[in-house]
Amino acid sequence: MDKYVVPLSPSPENPKPIRRPRWKRSIVELDGMLSSKYRHEISSLLLDSYSEIGAFGHLYHIDGAKCPTHMNRVGNVTSTSNQVPIRREGISGVEFDTKGIYLASVTKSGCLTVHDFETLYCLSNGLSTCVKEDETKHLVHLTTHQLDAVRWNLSNQDEVLRRRPTITVHGCEVRKGLSDIAFISTDKSRLLASDVYGVVNIWDRRISNLPCLELMANNHDTLNSIKLNVENQVVFGAGKHGIIYAWDLRGGRTPVAFQSNKEARHPPLTSLKISMMLEKIKSLKEQSNIFSKEIHSIDIDPSCPYQLAFHLDDGWSGVLDTNSFQVTHVHCPPPAWLDGSETSINCSYLRKPSWLPTCSIYAVGASSNNGIHLLDFYPDPSSTCHVDFNEDIGSVSEGKRRSMQNRFVPLSEGVTVCAAHPLNGTIIAGTKQSSLLVISQKRQSCCNGDYNRMDDNDY
């Protein structure tokens, strides 16, 4: 057998060991779970994969005639002499149901439409035999006055499909009061709605068709956005004066406030002016002049419930830590004049960003360009938007530094509102031209080899 043995060449006295890159995925396979830190490190792969894959204009009909949104879109296109649209248009609200099966959208022209998400996704990826969207597959398409918000009842997923004669649950014209809506996830009968007078009205529809409680802001601040925390115990509201309010539904300053309806109005537990909190960030104050700005929207991070994101009128976004009541993240895009673009003269649009379901990524419609920013708001100083982020830390590897960068996804139209699919992270963006844009991963074939091979370090 010795004649079949290949002799080895003599090895040096001190052979150098072969250095192999550490395979991070092995830890995940052994643990059987994905840590939040690991997800953050590979989030750059997710951000790089997003692009516009489909666009659906609101060119629909009701009883054979053009709907109001369709008519306003055609009218604004033909009147090219004016910079400002002569008729109200634009998507003012979009939201998925909890399972991501249906998508509800409302327009400033007064249309409420409920789409089948699978139909939109298949049309965008070329998986359907149809060339354009089939209107007959809309679950609902009805018209009323101007609509500014749409919500699914978290404990009754059919709620958005109904109209009640005394309570507007889909949204309503701002001039008449209501601006945003919130449902309590554990009680299908209780509904919250904010108005332009600085009041959060609470209905218990088992008791009356009229509000049973009112949560008052300090200075009759117009409330643009309200959110309930995950325990349904605290209501956050934000509005025109750049202040975030918090009311404790368990009683707040009056311990028996919600045990008796005799006391109908309640002050906030606390109020925080965002401009004053931003001035506490030394690095930001040295570079920018900070003024009080209107808050367009607030939203709670589904993967980190103590992070409350806010979006300002000038395009700035940030995160308020509701445990410490400190601003922990800030994103300040360059002003419109710096890159030669102009901000829209029409100031009637409230931009409404959305969190992705994982990785603490915040999708924000750009204020001056056609596109969205995907912002890394991970709750750690390793986030590029964190106020304590340090680019000069030598221990940060080049791969991690790459994953910390924000992304800008160019789109075909200006965005007013975003919604993220609760399961697969597909982003639906509503635009100023009343279109719905589908932003996700492109469907590509690997047969031709036109794809980038991942290195073990990417896992």
Image (tube, rainbow, N blue to C red):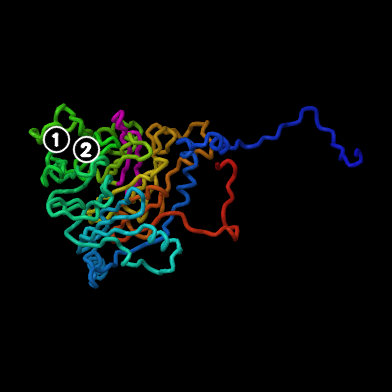
Q: Position of residue 3 (x, y in %)?
A: 92, 41
Q: Is residue 417 left or right of residue 131?
A: left
Question: In terms of sequence position, does the residue under pointer 2 or pointer 1 come before the other?
Answer: 1
Look at 15% across and 33% down and name the residue there. Answer: 258
Q: How many marks?
A: 2
Is 409 inside the magenta-drawn segment?
A: no
- Decide which of 98, 330 is in the foreground and name it: 98
Q: Position of residue 15 (x, y in %)?
A: 76, 30
Do the numbered discs 2 and 1 sit on residues whose CB atoms are within 8 Å?
Answer: yes
Q: Residue at x 14, y 41 (%)?
A: 199
Which residue is disc 1 drawn over?
A: 218
Tell me the tag on residue 102: none
Q: Which residue is mark 2?
A: 243
Judged left or right of residue 430, residue 376 is right
Residue 293 appears in the figure:
no
User: Viewed as shown, does residue 146 lie left or right of 357?
Assistant: left
In the current view of this chain or complex, which residue is farthest to the left? 262
Q: Which class describes the residues within 10 Å of circle 2: few (<14), some (14-19), or many (20+)?
A: many
Res 270 → quadrant? top left
> Magenta region: which residues?
315-335
- Name above or below for residue 313 compared with residue 256: below
